[in-house]
Amino acid sequence: TGSAAHVVEAGFAARDGIMAAQLAARGLAGNPSILDGRAGYFDALAGQPDIDLQLGSGSDFRVMAVGQKKYPCCYMLQRIIDTTKQLVADENILADDVARVTVEVNAAFPAIMKYPVPHDVEEARFSLPHVVAATLVGEPMDVRTFSAAKLADGHILEQRGKVDMVV
């Protein structure tokens, strides 16, 4: 997290999926027990555990449950942005009238949202204060919000200091 590698990792997975589908269409078969068979993935991790992994089939195939990001930042921040936008709109909140914003999170959250003061665009994508502050001031929460100019934006900087993360 906090590097450009994070931006392209989904592209690598998509590329690999397309390649696998193209190879399968040409007759290349894979090991049907690669997950749960002897020397498969689960065996490598835990030595033949008794795992009942329901992958589904057809329309309920597990890959169909993948979420999509609305905003170009960490997936864990998506609902926080939505909620902040909704509160600002519903309550006619002006950023300068806000004294503090407290966001309660689970214990894993701070290990990923680890940039209270982001130094570059990639760190901003994993910065709770940047995201909440930008949302409060009415940023569109698109690629423009995660730019060098917005990292130095005085209004966003002023709001960042109001954001607290509580585990």
Image (cartoon, rainbow, N blue to C red):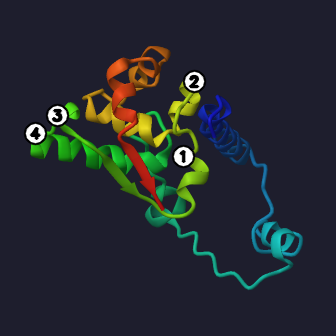
Residues at marks 4 and 1, CA–CA distance in whole angstroms: 28 Å
Left or right: residue 107 compared with residue 141: right
Chain-order first, disc 1 or disc 2: 1
Label 4 and label 3: CA atoms lie apart by 7 Å
Q: Which residue is depicted at the point 60% across and 39% down?
A: 10
CA separation in Å, label 1 and label 3: 25 Å
Give how far across and how far down residue 48 sits, in percent.
83, 80
Task: Give the labeled residue for mark 2.
Answer: 120
Q: Amino acid at mark 4?
A: Asn
Mark 3 = which residue?
94
Residue located beneath label 1 in the image: 113
Which residue bears the numbered disc 4?
92
Q: CA distance from mark 1 to mark 2?
A: 14 Å
- Residues at badges 4 and 3 in contact (C-beta under 8 Å)? yes
Label 4 crowd (10 A; few <14 / some 14-19 / many >=20): few
Q: Secondary structure at mark 3?
A: loop
